[in-house]
């Protein structure tokens, strides 16, 4: 039985019927994010409470860095459009002294091997054999065909072009060193364009369904439109979101295989060590908590059951952590998914200079241009403060520092 002291504080408004428990001591929480959390907690099918992680910040519909349990209903916008986005990391038998002094060649070779960014440049020009094999060995295409029979607007044309690709935004591939100077590979991506299509499509269907409903309660935000269990669209959304989550995991696996393949060409011989993690942080699944079967949506949160390994990345240039869950029931066995933004992308581009970005990432082989200013460390919360706020949720197993960072 876990008896650690809880570090959460209550964030709900006075008189609210559904509590909001936030692990936010020592980290900033925007007023708009607080209100967004209170909005979602007013829904009658949300509860027994909402759990808030220290990387919390404003999202669309639901707040990033939140764990939203529901009974008999599901909110597509709470899951979002980057369905199944998450992290993968593996430890190799390489050490720091096995890496070349100039890491630019390694970075460039990975960037040539794996398409990065959004738009046509982020797709495969020619689908690699390893990717074709992975897709053929899976049931992903057959399952998508079943979904498309009911929802033909969900196109399949990006599935093979984007499996094993990075995407843009905050997605990345990193070569890292741990506290013993062992080399790790860590990456962050999700279900790419097809997952985005699935999310966007069902969010719109939920909004249309909302127009037909007679509600006995106030819905404070149209983005909180929902499907009720027993409705055909509820089951069809669960089927589609489960597909996107599995595709996201397969995407990370394919990408990791290609990164490791490239490293084997450039570095001394190595093997993979026993430490490996592949975890979602934007997803929904059915779980049992407090004797109830709940649909738990983690929007920017990681499962942290007792003994379960997870990944909490910092920003470009900041530390990242491999963690082990403590199984804290109050957080629905969850922890943060990263540092969390403290500036919007627009604000970051306006406030952070190229000089500041280059100084903050001086120790990392990465892009130093204006195109990644919105991902610069100053745009994010202090990862050490985030970790301190959730010390009752996870314990640190490894501390990683980046030496190469590839952004979309």
Image (cartoon, grey):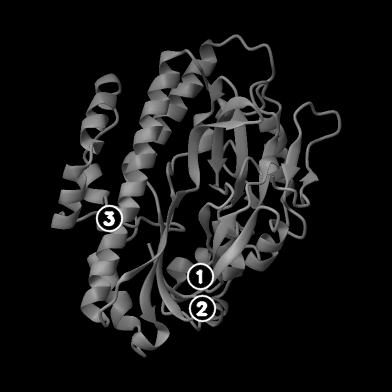
Kindly state the secondary structure of the residue where label 3 is placed.
Answer: helix
Residue 225 located left or right of residue 123: right
Q: Nearer the viewer, residue 385 or 224?
A: 385
Mark 2 burial class by Cα count in 10 Å: few <14, some 14-19, many 20+: many
**Quadrant of the image occupied by residue 124:** bottom left
Q: Could you say where residue 64 lies in the image, as x and y percent from the top left?
A: 59, 46
Whether residue 158 is visible to the viewer of this picture, yes or no, is no
Residue furthest right as drawn: 14
In the picture shown, does residue 86 fall above or below 288?
below
Residue 377 located left or right of residue 253: right
Q: First in sequence, mark 1 or 2: give its number.
A: 1
Whether residue 219 is visible to the viewer of this picture, yes or no, is yes
Mark 3 burial class by Cα count in 10 Å: few <14, some 14-19, many 20+: many
Q: Which mark is residue 361?
A: 2
Evaluate if marks 1 and 2 touch, with contact meaning CB atoms under 8 Å apart: yes
Residue furthest front as drawn: 1
Q: Residue at x 60, y 9 (%)?
A: 214
Q: Residue at x 42, y 35 (%)?
A: 199
- Of the residues tagged 2 and 3, which is closer to the observer? 3
């Amino acid at each position: 039985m876990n008896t650690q002291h809880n570090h959460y504080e209550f964030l709900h408004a006075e008189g609210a019927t559904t509590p909001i428990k936030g692990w936010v001591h020592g980290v900033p929480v925007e007023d708009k994010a607080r209100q967004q959390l209170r909005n979602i907690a007013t829904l009658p099918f949300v509860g027994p409470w909402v759990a808030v992680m220290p990387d919390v910040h404003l999202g669309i519909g639901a707040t990033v860095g939140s764990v939203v349990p529901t009974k008999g209903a599901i909110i597509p916008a709470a899951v979002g459009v980057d369905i199944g986005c998450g992290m993968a990391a593996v430890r190799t038998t390489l050490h720091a002294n096995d890496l070349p002094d100039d890491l630019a060649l390694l970075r460039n070779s990975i960037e040539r091997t794996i398409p990065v960014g959004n738009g046509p440049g982020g797709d495969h020009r020619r689908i690699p054999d390893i990717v074709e094999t992975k897709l053929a060995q899976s049931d992903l295409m057959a399952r998508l065909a079943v979904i498309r029979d009911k929802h033909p607007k969900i196109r399949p044309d990006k599935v093979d072009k984007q499996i094993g690709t990075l995407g843009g935004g905050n997605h990345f591939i990193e070569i890292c060193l741990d506290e013993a100077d062992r080399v790790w590979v860590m990456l962050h991506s999700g279900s790419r364009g097809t997952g985005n299509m699935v999310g966007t499509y069902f969010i719109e269907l939920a909004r249309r369904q909302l127009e037909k409903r007679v509600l006995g309660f106030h819905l404070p935000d149209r983005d909180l439109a929902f499907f009720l269990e027993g409705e055909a669209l509820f089951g069809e959304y669960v089927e589609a979101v489960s597909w996107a989550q599995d595709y996201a995991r397969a995407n990370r696996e394919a990408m990791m295989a290609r990164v490791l393949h490239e490293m084997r060409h450039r570095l001394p011989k190595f093997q993979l060590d026993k430490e490996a993690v592949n975890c979602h942080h934007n997803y929904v699944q059915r779980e049992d908590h407090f004797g109830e079967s709940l649909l738990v949506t983690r929007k920017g949160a990681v499962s942290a059951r007792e003994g379960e390994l997870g990944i909490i990345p910092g920003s470009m240039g900041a530390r990242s952590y491999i963690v082990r869950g403590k199984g804290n029931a109050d957080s629905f066995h969850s922890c943060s998914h990263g540092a969390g933004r403290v500036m919007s992308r627009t604000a970051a581009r306006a406030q952070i200079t190229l000089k500041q970005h280059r100084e903050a990432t001086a120790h990392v082989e990465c892009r130093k241009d204006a195109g990644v200013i919105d991902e610069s460390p100053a745009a994010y919360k202090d990862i050490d403060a985030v970790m301190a706020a959730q010390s009752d949720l996870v314990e640190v197993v490894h501390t990683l520092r980046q030496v190469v960072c590839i952004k979309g």
